[in-house]
Amino acid sequence: MPFPWLGRLGAANAGRSGRRRNRRAQKRSQGEVSAPQEDIQVITQRRQRRIGLGIGSVLILTIIGVVLLGYYQEFYRPPRVWAGSVRNVEFTMGDLVARIRVLQGVNRYQGGQVNLSRVPFEYLQNLVNAEILRQRSPVLGIQIQDDDIEQELRRQFLPTADPGEETDPGQLESEFRNSYGGYLTATGLSDADFRVIVEERLAQRALALLLAQEIEPIQPHVEVQWIQIPMDGEILIGDVAQRLANEDFTRVAQELNSANQFADPNGYVGWVPKGAFPDLDDYLYGNEEDEIAALKPGLVSEPIFTADAHYLLKVLAAAEDRELNNTMGQKLLQENVLLWQREALVAGTTAGTVRMNFNSRLYDWVTNQVFITAPRIDRPTPVPDLISGVPLPGPGP
């Protein structure tokens, strides 16, 4: 070789360039190996993020769903749940709450309270009874006009002038508006709400007038004395019955009798017609169908348990025909109205034209809603009972 050193130089250069190529090839091979590894890590991280976001989204949606379901179950659905119907007229739980609030406002204004342990279902029955009467009114000949409602409002809230006192019609009208408006404000009622109540009560009064015509002015009475014990009291009626084995009936009655409009402090009720106290009729008049004999004069009954109170009866005189007095006549009339309502309700339920829907869960919802909005009224005022004062046929003291 003419220039042997060129070979050595070329070999040396070739070695260096080869090494560079080898290093570049090695880097490329390493890059080709690391790139898939980096891609796998990125894919894994992305997958983990997607899974985390998915789980978080599911949890958030679940929480939102639970909240919405709770809102639907507690606030949206209950007021719209069907509570009762009479033919094509339906009542919802919201209607029931609204009507109980009306009753609540009236009672608080009068100084009383609504008994939420009994009122929800009873007032649902009242709604149904009022609608049954409204639908039957044309057949019964009952017509309640707007003028009748206005006249009743004025009877309740229009001031009355003393005999011989000069009155200014404009002043009386102003006082009526102020008195009626103050009543609506204090009870939280609207004029429309209260007019509906007045209309229903006038219809019930008209029904009572019709039923009063069927009451005989002279009918059998039994002279009665009783011991009446409240259901929620601490005194047990069985213990009272044991005391009567050795103690005088009148003295025990004076000690234990709860105050009421039908008996004096001695427990003396007087002459009681059949039907005035339906739960006591079997003891006072007997029941041939159930082979129950009437109490004989001088004897004391076994303890009697009713929906309102517990009783021990003592018959003072056997049944004899007597004239109805006002107290017993009104009580008998009220019971006849209740009997008409019960029979109409049973007939409608049997025929499928009357239905009611009520259970413990709906009861709890209704009572909670009514309790939350209970008004706080300090000044009571009387509101006339539209059933009282209904005249009975025939003579009476």
Image (cartoon, grey):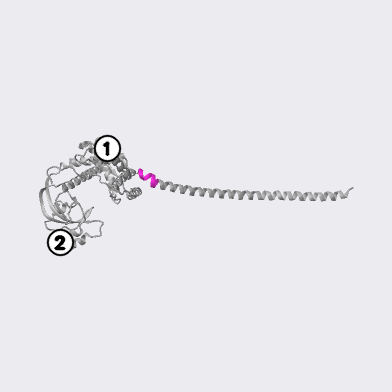
Using the image as rendered, state which of residue 343 and residue 156 is in the foreground.
Answer: 156
Res. 291 in view: no
Question: Percent from the top left, x then y, of residue 262?
Answer: 18, 52
Side of 54 relative to 18 (left or right): left
Using the image as rendered, state which of residue 318 and residue 260 is in the foreground.
Answer: 260
Q: Secondary structure at mark 2?
A: loop
Amino acid at the residue labelled 2: Asp
On the image, which quarter does residue 148 sit in?
top left
Which contiguous range is marked in magenta?
Answer: 72-80
Residue behind mark 2 = 248
Residue at image coords 69%, 49%:
29
Amino acid at the residue labelled 1: Gln
Residue behind mark 1 = 171
Between marks 1 and 2, how big is the CA–CA gap?
Answer: 60 Å
Q: Secondary structure at mark 1?
A: helix
Question: Percent from the top left, x then y, of residue 237?
Answer: 21, 59
Residue at image coords 27%, 36%:
170
Question: Percent from the top left, x then y, of residue 350?
Answer: 24, 43
Q: Count up the numbered dots.
A: 2
Q: Is residue 207 magenta?
A: no
Residue at the extreme bottom of the image, as rendered? 246
Residue at image coords 43%, 46%:
68
Specify which label sits upstream in the sequence, 1 or 2. Answer: 1
Question: Percent from the top left, x then y, of residue 344?
Answer: 22, 43
Q: Is residue 77 magenta?
A: yes
Q: Main secondary structure of the magenta part?
A: helix
